[in-house]
Amino acid sequence: MEFLVLIGLLWLIGAIFGKKAPKHRPVNPRVAEEARANAAQSQADFDEAFKQWSDRALAFAGQGRWIPKGTASRFLASYPAPQHRAKTWKQAVGDSSPEETLRLRYAKFNGQHMVFERIACGRFFNTVERSPLTEEQIHACICMDDAVMVVAAAGSGKTSTMVAKTGYALHRGLAKPEQILLLAFNKATAEEVGVRIAEQLKEVPQVERVRSSTFHAFGIDVIAKATGKKPSLAPWVDPGNPGADVREVGDIIQMLCDQDKAFKRDWDLFRTVYARDVGKWGQPDEPEAYGNGVRGFRTARGEVVKSKEERTISDWLFYNGVKYEYERPYEHDTADHQFRQYFPDFYYPDIQLYHEHFAINGRGEAPKQFKDYLAGVKWKRELHAKLGTALFETTSHGLLTGEAIPALAMALRARGVHLVFEPDREGTGLSPVQAHDLARSFRVFQQHVKNNGLDRLDLHAALAAQSQDGFGARLRMYLKIYEQIAQEWERRLQRGNFIDFEDMLILASEHVESGAYRSPFVLILADEFQDSSRARIRLLKALSNQSDPPAHLCVVGDDWQGINRFAGSDITVMTEFEKTFNHATRLSLSTTFRCPQDLCDIASQFIQANPAQIKKKVKTTNPLTKTPILAYGFADQASIVGHVEKQLAHMHQLAVSGKLLPLKGPCITVMLLGRYRDDRPGAIEVWQRRFGDKLSIEYRTVHGSKGLEAEYVFVLNVVEGTRGFPSQIQDDPALQLAMPAPDPFPVAEERRLFYVAMTRARKQVRLYTTLAQPSRFLVELVKQEHLKIEPVDGDALEPCPGCGRGVLQLRSGPYGDFHGCSRFPACTFKRKVSQESLPAVPFKPNAQRLSTSTNVGDPCPVCKQGMLQSRSGRNGPFLGCSRFQHGCKATRSLGG
């Protein structure tokens, strides 16, 4: 019965809801025909609308000219694409969007235009410069996208391309002379470009109206036209007075010290104790010195401590006159089967107080690489409590936040210690950072602050962020000192009614952006783009965007040669070009007219070890195949100059006999390069007089050589050390308060600088180093088999198998002779050597400190055979015996 009821219910539901359409409903032929007609009409309407829209797009772009990438979006803003009634754009046209359709069509037109222009302007491209333009140079001339960045290899004809692009635009009627602006970063380059345009394009009417200017001269003109009053650039920032800005900062610091006791104390405390950063918490420190059985960091007092944080504490104690002992054995014997003898970090004998500095962060954690560290902390605390010895603790967290030092001062005073801060106290170890170096750091910081448009709130926000894992106490002190320096700097500008370079760029940008200055330029070219600051980028962007369509912007640069970060430049302007400028295009000039191919290959591989550098393959027109790179090693750095003189004399002899000929002109060009101004040989004037009839000899720093070339390039003093190459005078981490994140690759800017040095040579580059401390860059080239260092007066070098950055040196230890790395204590690689393989060494005493009365040129008082010479090492300049390679280790620090 229940079953029948269920069947009936299902039948009723089906009767109400279950009616289905027939499987084959008959179709009305008339309706179907109307649908087909409507669809055909819809397609026809779309096809007609699409054709009209496409024709209008081509007309909008202009006939016979390059169509910039941004034209597509500008056209769509005024003329939206037609819409199909039943289909998506992809279904109707095949492209993902109307903008893609336009870009593809414009790109096809540009490809045809490129081919036509190469033929039509072939004679111009072949004759505008001394040599016909390369295919890449021609492409850069013809391409007129909204913003074009030409990434150019060293010696690839950047200036020639700028001159040729100017001429092409004038010949093809793309711009009038007065509508073209060329901007350079220094006066010499601006003048050179102007002269070459006048000479190479002299047949163009009114070509002299093309403007070639420095950024600062142009910026001043913009302000003058916008306001009716020409501003005055402060004399101490004028590009014609190099170094004056740093000297002005130094003068401000001295004035503030004289007038403000609080500032003087902050300044003295910073330069003596806080000038050297301790790095981020938890990151391993690479030891810089070795002494008293410890690998670590030398203090002002002269001993070596295990961490940079301990060095900061030690230096504070030293300059406050606190008597302390570092790692003195604990007064109780603790050595057993589980623990060795305990050596507390600091001990204050006058008050019987022990002091442990624990590497613990704010969460009570130890660095990951410190195994069982917290167990050791617990053991030490319990040991002091058990044996009744007084213990004071500081932690990494307390030091970084600034709490540790005041707490230590309070604890010492509470126990009767009288603190007397004496910033000029003489130490036997690491000297305070030089005032000039700090003044330079504050000036660089100021440039980045202004160039990036940062105010006080921005800086303090950056301070809060970077204090999370950085040395916040130091950063606060740095920023406090800077703000007072900057305030006086601005006061001096106002008093003289001056502006500085950064003000000029910012004011000029504001006047262009506001429309107070109306730009007449439709073509803007900028050289050395890798040296641009954010303020320069802002000005270029404002100029190009003021008109509609935008003016064509073409910048030329080489990120491989970005070496002016210290002057406010920002290398990321190249790597982020497409993000900064809309509808941007990147081109390249990869053919150099300068270096031999082997040198191109070596230098290119060297610079591209940094993955952040823009990749390119450099080829050359230089046919020379003779060994393009040589290196010479010396037992002593002082021997380098004498060897250079012998090589110059030999070259002069070959030139006189006609066996060595100049590439052009009457003389063979020789450029001596140094990392620093004081690398300049004192005998250079003598060499110029003696060899000047055949050799044109000049000295430049590597920074000053950019853009120049010579047949032979001699790079002097390519050694490892604080003032070596690479320089280990690191940028102050405080600069990051005003800058983008730094390039994480080790010594990235110094690597670019070495690339610049190598790529000045048309024939050959020669590198001069020492056998004891060759530059890590040379060791890298040797390890890659690009180079062999010829030992002039010593033994051949072997790269360290441990770190690959140092070389092996013969040393003696308690267990016999061994080969150790030249980078000790940073690298501890050792390899025992057999007695049979050892050279006879008549004298081999242990290292011995010389008295402060010894001077350069004195006979060595230790071995009685050598002479004392000035040398450079990892910890700065020092006196050393000339018989160092023969085993005499007599030395005396000269400070720094």
Image (cartoon, rainbow, N blue to C red):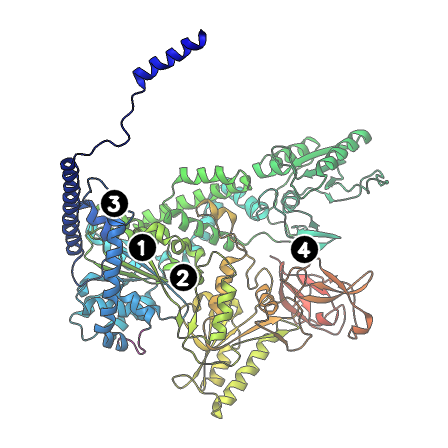
Q: Residues within 10 Å of mark 3 (few under 14, many from 20)?
A: some
Judged by depth in the image, the label closer to the viewer, 4 or 1, is 1
Q: Please tell me which of labels 4 and 1 falls first in the chain.
A: 4
Q: Can you say whether 531 is above or below 618 in the image? A: above
Examine the rendering and report whether any part of residue 500 can be seen.
no
Q: Name the amino acid type tagged 4.
A: Ala
Identify the residue position indicated by label 1 in the image. 584
The disc at residue 242 is 2
- Residue 746 is situated, as x and y percent measured from the top left of the image, at 55, 56
Q: Quadrant of the C terminus?
A: bottom right
Q: Please tell me which of labels 3 and 2 falls first in the chain.
A: 3
- Residue 579 is situated, as x and y percent measured from the top left of the image, at 36, 50
Q: Are marks 4 and 2 in contact (CB under 8 Å)?
A: no
Q: Please tell me which of labels 3 and 1 falls first in the chain.
A: 3
Image position of 607 (left or right of 293): left
Examine the rendering and report whether any part of residue 480 can be seen.
yes
Q: Please tell me which of labels 4 and 2 falls first in the chain.
A: 2
The magenta span reads 128-133
Alpha-carbon span between mark 2 and mark 1: 35 Å
- Residue 823 is situated, as x and y percent measured from the top left of the image, at 66, 60
